[in-house]
Amino acid sequence: MDALFDPILAPIVDFASWFLGAAERRLGTSVRFEATRYFSATLAVFLLVWIVFEGSLKARKIPARGPRTFEARSRQIRREIFYSISSVFVYMTMSIFLFEGAADGIFKFYHDPDKYGPLYKYGSFFILILVHDAYFYWSHRAMHHPLLFKWTHAVHHRTKDPTPFTAYAFAPGEAAVNFMIIPLYALVLPLHDMTTVYFLWFQIFRNAMAHAGYELMPRGWARHPILGLNSSVTHHHMHHEKMTGNYGFYFTFWDRLMGTEHKDYLDRVDAITAGDRRVEPNAIPSAGG
Ligand SMILES: [Zn+2]
Ligand SMILES: [Zn+2]
């Protein structure tokens, strides 16, 4: 019997013992970093936008579909935090493989800031944002395909009226797709340790802001040829309302290039930044495609 099972069991046991050893080495760092990142960014945006400056931002609250009770909102936030914690677990687990792969030289992480010069060290932060924007747009559109939607992106779209806590409200499959930007980038291009850390902090704050529920972009920016390339809160909020279109993350560039930006996007931003409460979400398609 041993001869029958050994070829199957031996690699599993080897992998399990390798993984437990790696987890022991890496888990403390991963837990601290991922949990701190999620809770500090979402809580900071929530406290600033929903509590501290709520009075002055009141006119910029993006109108919700129908009345929202305190109980319904609390239920939504509890669900979002539950799925976000599951996403943090996915990131922690995948970080273990990333750290081990980096130690083995599979990924091109580097520590010496002079290795590629300061221009690349700081420039790679912006390159990574541009690469991530393209990765997010296309992986997001792929996850809207009916074959993938239910297993990946449906959890995120249970929220129609986002809060900062929606930022990481993903099914584990979507969390894994989102994590892959760092290993994919570092497989091809060098990435300084601190550039990675700054990027991950920037990314979670930008994510929490995209789900802020209040428009934060100054009035007039959305129609500006350059400033309007920056994606507003309304841009992603409309994606949650309608479950289609406005797939981009940092920028409006890909949606404009591919014709997926909602035609009434600029009118919505104008109305919200002017405090016009008469503009409500348009008829919302029910499909998730
Ligand atoms: Zn979202
Ligand atoms: Zn989506």
Image (spheres, rainbow, N blue to C red):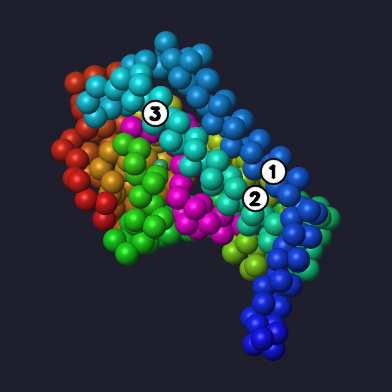
Please indicate whether residue 202 sits to the left or right of residue 49 in the image. right
Q: Is residue 239 left or right of residue 198?
A: left
Q: Which residue is mark 2?
A: 92
| Residue named by callout 1 | 31
Q: Is residue 22 above or below residue 198?
A: below
User: Mark number for residue 75?
Assistant: 3
Inspect the image, locate mark 2, and give the three-letter code of the amino acid beneath it: Met
Question: Mark 1: which amino acid?
Answer: Val
> Callout 3 environment at 10 Å: few (<14), some (14 to 19), or many (20+)?
few
Rendered-image quadrant of the C terminus:
bottom left
Q: Give, as a single range, the part of the protein colored magenta.
A: 161-182
Q: Is residue 31 magenta?
A: no
Residue 196 sits above or below residue 116 on the image:
above
Mark with earlier residue (2, 1): 1
Query: Which one is in front in this view, the residue at disc 3 or the one at disc 2?
Result: 3
Asked if the stretch drawn in magenta spans residue 172, the answer is yes
